[in-house]
Image (cartoon, grey):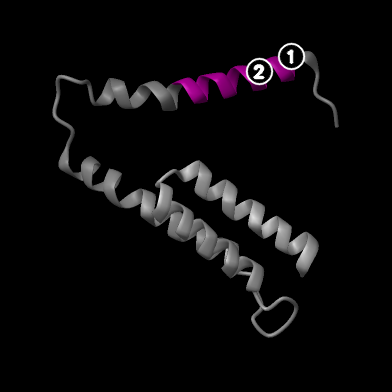
Amino acid sequence: MTMTLTQQVVTIAMVIIGTMLTRFLPFLIFPPNKATPKYVQYLGNVLPAAVIGLLVIYCLKDVNLFSGSRGIPEFLAIAVVAVLHVWKRQMLLSIAGGTIVYMLLVQTVF
């Protein structure tokens, strides 16, 4: 299915509007001269860990411990991510390191 030029322009415009709205709305709702509400500060503290936990659970939901590679590449990649993150505290390095280790294990070892 191909989109017409009008549909492409409307789609790109909607993406731009959505992106701009999500980027600028927090600054409009919470200006710098106004104190950030406590519940927003709380969400800012707990949501990153909750999202990461949710992603880990989602990634491991199809791992079968009784067949195939028994989840060994997944758990080794998670260990690499944890060690890199504790060591360097750089999210991109941790994610990239774990992904590389996982892909190497899946493509070459298991």
| Magenta-span inclusion, residue 10 | yes
Kindly check if marks 2 and 1 are in contact, taking CB atoms under 8 A apart as contact: yes
Q: Nearer the viewer, residue 3 or 80?
A: 80
Give the number of the disc on residue 74.
Answer: none
Q: Nearer the viewer, residue 33 or 71?
A: 71
- For image coordinates 65% across by 68% down, the residue present is 73
Left or right, 66 with respect to 96, comes to right
Return the residue at label 1.
Answer: 6
| Label 2 Cα crowd, 10 Å radius (few <14 / some 14-19 / many 20+) | few
Label 2 element class = helix
Magenta region: 7-20
Task: Locate residue 99, reporting x and y percent.
Answer: 63, 52
- For image coordinates 52% across by 19% down, the residue present is 17
- Hey, which quadrant is residue 35 in on the image? top left
Residue ranking furthest to the bottom:
66
Q: Tell me how many marks there are.
A: 2
Return the residue at label 2.
Answer: 10
Left or right, 37 with respect to 82, comes to left
Does residue 62 sit above or below 49 in this rendering? below
